[in-house]
């Protein structure tokens, strides 16, 4: 590790202020980012969730200096993405799902060494690092195999090794487990977590369509749609937004007084027989909505008084998918209901919950936009 490794005193790992990005597509312009503000601390594992076309990859391309913002400002560890691209490229790397970078005719080892030279490592240092990373990602058996013959999962392990070759401070992962089997996806997640834990300050920005993956990995998550951040917080904070009450499912041997007796108890907002209850079964299933967990004690005491025995008790927890559907207004794969394509500044706002105000669009000052380099091209 060099003395330049990130620490507590460093500026924000990611600082985005009023970033807009407009693509000059035909027949209409596409507003891919409609004014994004975002701050990610050094050492954070941050997730971006949003439906197809939300603007996630566009934001990553801007942060990795592959694309210019139309307006606004973005910095990586204090370096400006427009003015200080060389500094940023030294301290970051990116791995995208389904990436096909490199030359199929080379072996895994040769390919990674070639990238190590692009990244400016010395020849000997390059081989040492390549061999270390091949072991770290579990490609030991494939090290002399041609890249063109790798399976999808093996190729992605190689891409991850490529992403770590320059010892980045910040790693951008754009759907890194796309199309991987359960074990391969878990392998990638463990690799990233181990890499991050090894040095304080290492930072990750992840996009994924796998809600459980985001929940497992991310300390904070931003939900984006139509180029705007709709909500931001820890997974727990986001879940509490969609479900403030405590919801329990109770199974009892009998409930002679009926659910009305439960509904009258303090702290019980509602009590209803579960819709899936089996009339023949020797048990009664009740869905209880409580103002908070503490109200459960009173319910248990009351049931004992009524002579009912609790056979099972389960708390129902919201998932990130519930949050997503609530905020974005549709599940993954559903049709976009945000209005006509092209200019979509109006979309998305109506789907935010009442207490969540989408971030305002910043001024639309005209600025030259860049032609767009290849996403998988990693230049020094
Ligand atoms: N080069 C381009 N030219 C024109 N429009 C583009 C270009 N790249 C992206 N877009 C548009 O910008 C919007 C945002 O795309 P982006 O790739 O950032 O979305 P995303 O959130 O990464 O989606 P996904 O989950 O499908 O990867 C989309 O409407 C897309 O069609
Ligand atoms: Mg994308």
Image: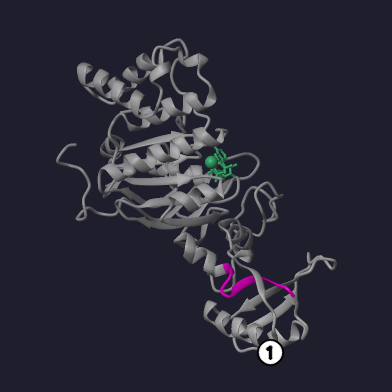
Q: Which colour scheme is used?
A: one colour
Q: The magenta stretch spans which residues? A: 242-253
Q: Quadrant of residue 145?
A: top left
Is any atom of residue 203 visible in this view? yes
Question: Are there few (<14), some (14-19), or many (20+) residues within 10 Å of tag 1?
Answer: few
Q: Mark 1 points at which residue?
A: 264
In this rendered view, identify the residue nearer to me: 339 or 4: 4
- Residue at 40% x, 26% y is 138
Q: Position of residue 319 (x, y in %)?
A: 58, 59
Report the number of numbered marks: 1
> Is 323 situated left or right of 221 in this image?
right
> Is 156 situated left or right of 161 in this image?
right
Q: Position of residue 245 (x, y in %)?
A: 58, 75
Image quarter where the N terminus lies is top left
Residue 251 part of the magenta-drawn span: yes
Please say if 67 is above or below 42.
above
Image quarter where the C terminus lies is top left
Q: Where is residue 274 in the image (x, y as percent from the top left)?
A: 75, 70
């Amino acid at each position: 590790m060099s003395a330049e490794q990130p620490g507590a005193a460093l500026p924000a790992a990611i600082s985005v202020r009023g970033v807009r990005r407009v693509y000059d597509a035909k027949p209409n312009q596409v507003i891919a980012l409609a004014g994004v503000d975002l701050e990610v601390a050094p050492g954070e594992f941050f997730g971006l969730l949003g439906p197809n076309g939300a603007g996630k990859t566009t934001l990553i391309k801007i942060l990795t200096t592959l694309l210019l913002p139309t307006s606004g400002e973005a910095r990586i560890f204090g370096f400006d993405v427009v003015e200080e691209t060389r500094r940023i490229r030294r301290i970051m790397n990116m791995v995208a799902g389904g990436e096909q970078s490199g030359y199929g005719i080379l072996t895994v080892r040769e390919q990674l060494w070639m990238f190590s030279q692009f990244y400016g490592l010395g020849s000997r240092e390059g081989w040492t690092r390549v061999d270390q990373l091949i072991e770290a990602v579990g490609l030991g058996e494939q090290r002399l195999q041609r890249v063109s013959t790798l399976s999808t999962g093996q190729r992605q392990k190689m891409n991850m090794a490529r992403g770590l070759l320059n010892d980045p401070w910040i790693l951008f992962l754009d759907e890194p487990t796309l199309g991987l089997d359960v074990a391969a996806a878990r392998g990638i997640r463990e690799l990233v977590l181990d890499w991050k834990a090894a040095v304080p300050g290492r930072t990750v920005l992840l996009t994924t369509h796998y809600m459980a993956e985001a929940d497992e990995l991310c300390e904070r998550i931003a939900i984006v749609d139509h180029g705007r951040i709709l909500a931001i917080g820890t997974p727990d904070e986001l879940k509490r937004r969609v479900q403030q009450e405590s919801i329990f499912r109770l199974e009892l041997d009998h409930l002679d007084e009926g659910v009305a007796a439960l509904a009258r108890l303090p702290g019980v907002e509602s009590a209803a027989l579960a819709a899936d209850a089996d009339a023949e079964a020797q048990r009664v299933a009740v869905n209880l909505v409580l103002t908070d967990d503490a109200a459960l004690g009173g319910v248990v005491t009351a049931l004992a008084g009524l002579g009912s025995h609790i056979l099972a008790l389960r708390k129902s927890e919201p998932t990130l998918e519930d949050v997503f559907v609530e905020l974005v207004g549709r599940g993954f794969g559903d049709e976009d209901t945000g209005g006509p394509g092209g200019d979509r500044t109006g979309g998305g706002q109506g789907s935010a919950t009442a207490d969540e105000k989408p971030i305002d669009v910043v001024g639309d000052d005209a600025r030259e936009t860049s032609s767009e380099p290849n996403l998988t091209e990693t230049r020094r």
